[in-house]
Image: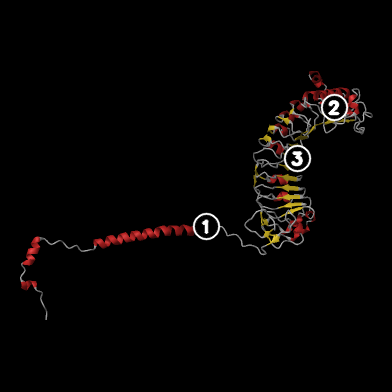
Amino acid sequence: MYILSSLLCALVASPPEACKALRGFYDAIGAKDKSPSFADTSSTCCAFLDVRCTQPDGSPSPPLGQKEGWKAGATLTKIKFRGGTELGGSGTLPGALLLPLAGTLEYLDLGKEGDRSFSGTLPAELAQLTALQKLSLTTGKFSGTIPHQLGRLPALEKVTLLSKRLSGTVPGELCHRSDGSLRKLYLDDNVKLSGTLPPECFLLPTLEEISAKKTRISGTLPSKITAPLRLLILEEVSLSGSVPEELCKGEKLEELVLRRANRVSGTLPTECLSHDTITKIDLKRTKVGGTIPSLDKAVPKLKTLDLSNSDVSGTLPASVDMFSGLEYLAVDRTKLYGIVPESLGDIRGLKNGTCTLQNAYDSVFISIVSKTCCYSNFWCPLPSNAPYCTETSSGEAIVCSVMSPPPPPPSAPSLASDTAVVVLLICAIAIPAAAWLLYTLCKRVAITSTVVVPKMTELDSAAVEHVPEEEARPTHYN
């Protein structure tokens, strides 16, 4: 390894030196290319099945695996372990052995999941492959963290790290180079990858695609987004916040997927639904609310609209046929209600696609009941020209049980009614108290107004006894 590493000074290796370094790399990992020319050490490595070279004059390359036809000065630009190589038992990636290819190697694909795929950690030496444009890793045997040194690569355009064992956080250095070339960042399935997405990535003037589904990435969605994003997939993550309005004001947005990011809230951005380039909006199992707006122009490129299990409310607009390109529509388990527009049947792509309106649980306004399992907030009658939207998952027709709109929900109590309640409570307490006080007062007045007769003494009794009979008799008047 030390001898081969000393070739680092040759930033642009000549074909013989490049092939020598590549064979040393193969020997270190116990790998063999399946091409017949691999056993011939004097033949060019450009004939290897998992290697791609570029002719010096830009002329077409010979057929894959053919050693004849390569011109002097051909450069090794791609290594792609995708079935043309038999890997050995160790599989540990010796990054230092690739350093002689630093000035020419543009694409390094470390292969997909397999019994003999690479393992270990991502070596920091990869950051010295200065010509590298694409780095791909889809095997689940790599562990450790993402080297922050990768942010130094000036030509790096695409990073695909779909391992299941990478941990740590997303290094902000990946998006620090405003003069860099990073356009695509894929970090899917790294269930141990946590922390937040660097806000610098959403400001990078070159970044067009971000995908980090099924990770433990958390934090909030940034309110400021200036990157020209074409694709944003943050499925099954712990992000919170609302969908930024700036996201839908860009000119390139095609896919917005926040599926099962159940902490994301806010309102449905109307700019996204009417965007000229949008093809997919998936907000399933989020807390996004708001309403579906009426459209005054067609949105023919939108193929998928999944709002199921969200807090979207209101009614389906009569102009729903403006989503003329829809092939997948799911609005079940939402707060949508009302009449289903006949114009839904004018969307031809739903006929052979997916259209789901029913709910799988009872709700406030039950008006569509299936024979098997499903309910909906929509009113009957259903549009007759869209039977594929009014069937259960088992293919049975939904049976309508309520033919008229249900009564509106009770209005919220007003300030006046709240005041009346308070007055009634005060009266209920004050009136009995006042009655008791009045009763007590009257009782005291009655007692004080009564004449008290003094008790007769013995002297008074004797005087009465000696009163003459004539004086004691009453006087009669004729």
Name the residue that disc number 1 marks: 415
Note whether 42 is above or below 356 in the view shown.
above
User: In the rendering, at what x and y percent does residue 112 appear?
Assistant: 79, 34
Q: Please give the count of numbered marks on the rendered protein.
A: 3
Dot 1 or dot 3, earlier in sequence: 3
Circle 2 SS class: strand
CB under 8 Å between discs 1 and 3? no
Among the 4 quarters of the image, the one containing residue 54:
top right
Amino acid type at circle 2 is Lys
Viewer-side label of 3, 2 = 2
Circle 3 SS class: strand
**Disc 2 residue crowd, few under 14, some 14–19, many 20+, Cα 10 Å:** some
Point out the residue furthest to the top here: 3
Residue 4 vs residue 57: left or right? left
Amino acid type at circle 3 is Glu
Cα–Cα span, label 1 and label 3: 50 Å
Cα–Cα span, label 3 and label 2: 35 Å
User: In the rendering, at what x and y percent does residue 111 appear?
Assistant: 80, 32
CB under 8 Å between discs 3 and 2? no
User: In the rendering, at what x and y percent does residue 323 appear?
Assistant: 76, 54
- Name the residue nearer the viewer: 277 or 31: 31
Amino acid type at circle 1 is Leu
Point out the residue furthest to the bottom here: 478
Circle 1 SS class: helix
Name the residue that disc number 3 marks: 209
Name the residue that disc number 2 marks: 32
Viewer-side label of 1, 2 = 2
